[in-house]
Image (spheres, helix red, strand yellow):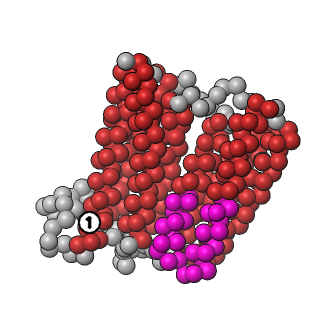
Amino acid sequence: MAEKMKTALWKLSSLMVFTQSAIVVTGGAVRITGSGLGCSTWPECTPGSYTPTPDQPEAPLHAWIEFGNRLLTFILLLNALALMAFILKSGARHLRRLGAFQIIGILAQGVLGGITVLTGLNPATVAAHFLLSIVLIAGALSLRQRAHAKTPTTIAPIPLVRNLMRAHLLLTIAVLFMGTIVTGSGPHAGDSTAERFNLDSKMMAWIHADLVIALLGVTVALVIAIKLGESEATRSRLSPLSQQFLIVALAQGAIGYVQYFTGLPELIVGAHLIGAILVWLFAWNLAITGNLVARKGT
């Protein structure tokens, strides 16, 4: 029975990471296709109906795209509730806070999504919606790695590596944050009537690119520092993760330049969004594996 419980925890925690990431992708699809106001109100889709209706003010496809994204929130919540039930049943006390955080965060995300719709897709609320998802993805990955016992307490990086890891994580956060500013200044607003940040989108894109270049530089330094300065045990855990991040970040940077110089085509923008999620997953996994992020509640 204990083995079945452990297997269920593994599967549900892995599914949590996937679904938290997937809702960012579907949210991006809503924005890229201009379906952000496909459902014109919240929590209903249209006044008097929780589902799209034939007399939708928006095109039917836009309504169903937005409605599909809303449905995924309920799947996320069911996933989180099932995961929390297994955490409580298994007696895994060190996972309770992270399990509860997923439930609370998903509910908050639903409310924030409603505010986003009711404010006509204000770019600040759209950015906050994405950034909250990033926090929830981090929490889901932390929960998964603890459930799989993949965050060892024995790793203690040398000061140079620890400082580089700290700079690496902060720069990754800065890159993601700046990406929301670029998005809020660019053409893919989610709806033709949505507001934009009153900023020069090209200037914002170049600041974003500069931060990416800085992140790549710190990553290269981190890879070298781990290889030359760490013990074999620490190197065996951190070196592959740092190298994998470098590969993912280089690919993401390449996609970013392609989308910029090709006029932000929808498919490339979608690929860049998926890349952003992968960059964050690899960055956070590196941070928690190296014990950069405190492991409270263990």
Q: Is residue 78 left or right of residue 218?
A: left
Q: Can residue 271 be seen from the camera position used here?
A: yes
Q: Report x, y in % for residue 102.
A: 42, 39
Q: Report x, y in % for residue 119.
A: 34, 65
**Residue sticking out furthest to the right:** 228
Quarter in which the C terminus is drawn: top right
Q: Which residue is mark 1?
A: 64
Q: Residue at x 64, y 28 (%)?
A: 152
Q: Residue at x 80, y 42 (%)?
A: 226
| Residue 151 placement: quadrant | top right
Q: Can residue 158 be seen from the camera position used here?
A: no
What's the magenta region? 249-276
Q: Reply yes or no: does residue 254 show up in magenta.
A: yes
Instruction: Residue type at mark 1: give it.
Output: Trp
Quarter in which the N terminus is drawn: top left
Q: Is residue 74 left or right of residue 234?
A: left
**Compared to 7, does 178 lie above or below?**
below
